[in-house]
Image (cartoon, rainbow, N blue to C red):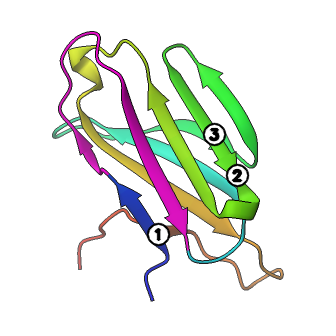
Amino acid sequence: GQQVQQSPVSLVLQEGEKAELQCTFSTTFNSVQWFYQRPGGSLVSLFFNPSGTKQSGRLTSTTVPKERSSSLHISSSQTTDSGTYFCAMNPQCSPHTCSLYTNIQLGG
């Protein structure tokens, strides 16, 4: 089944707007990562957040492991915040059986 559900994936923002992205996961996890990609640009890591709330400038990430969820809040957005956002989780697993589940679409 699907490992990661995210809403929304892409954002088109005007200056000063607020936005929230939400991810839910089908299994328990050790940590969550948030990434950002500008149109035609490379992937940028925003947060590595195992649990709780982390803030970086106008961005806030909140991860609640027992709810298998993580959110990303953008306050007073800038037009440069528009783009595609990805969440990824590192599942709880035994050594040598781990893989990173993500909603990033890989070519193939």
- Other residues around mark 2 within 10 Å, as few (<14) / some (14–19) / many (≥20): some
- The amino acid at mark 3 is Thr
74 shown above or below 62: above
Viewer-proximal residue, 73 or 92? 73
Image coords of residue 100 (percent x, y): 57, 69
Instruction: Tell whether label 3 touches label 2 (CB within 8 Å).
Output: yes
Task: State yes or no: residue 18 in magenta.
Answer: yes
Is 68 placed left or right of 88 in the picture? right
Residue designated by label 1: 4
Which residues, given as a range, are shown in magenta? 8-25
Q: Amino acid at mark 2?
A: Val
Disc 1: CA contacts within 10 A as few (<14), some (14-19) or many (>=20): many
Is 52 colored magenta in this rendering?
A: no
Badge 1 or badge 2: first in the primary sequence: 1
User: In the rendered structure, which disc, 3 or 1, sits on the residue that comes first in sequence?
Assistant: 1
Q: Which mark is residue 64?
A: 2
Residue 65, image x, y percentages: 73, 58
Q: Residue 55 is drawn in which quadrant?
A: top right
On residue 62, the disc is 3
| CA gap, disc 3 and disc 1 | 16 Å
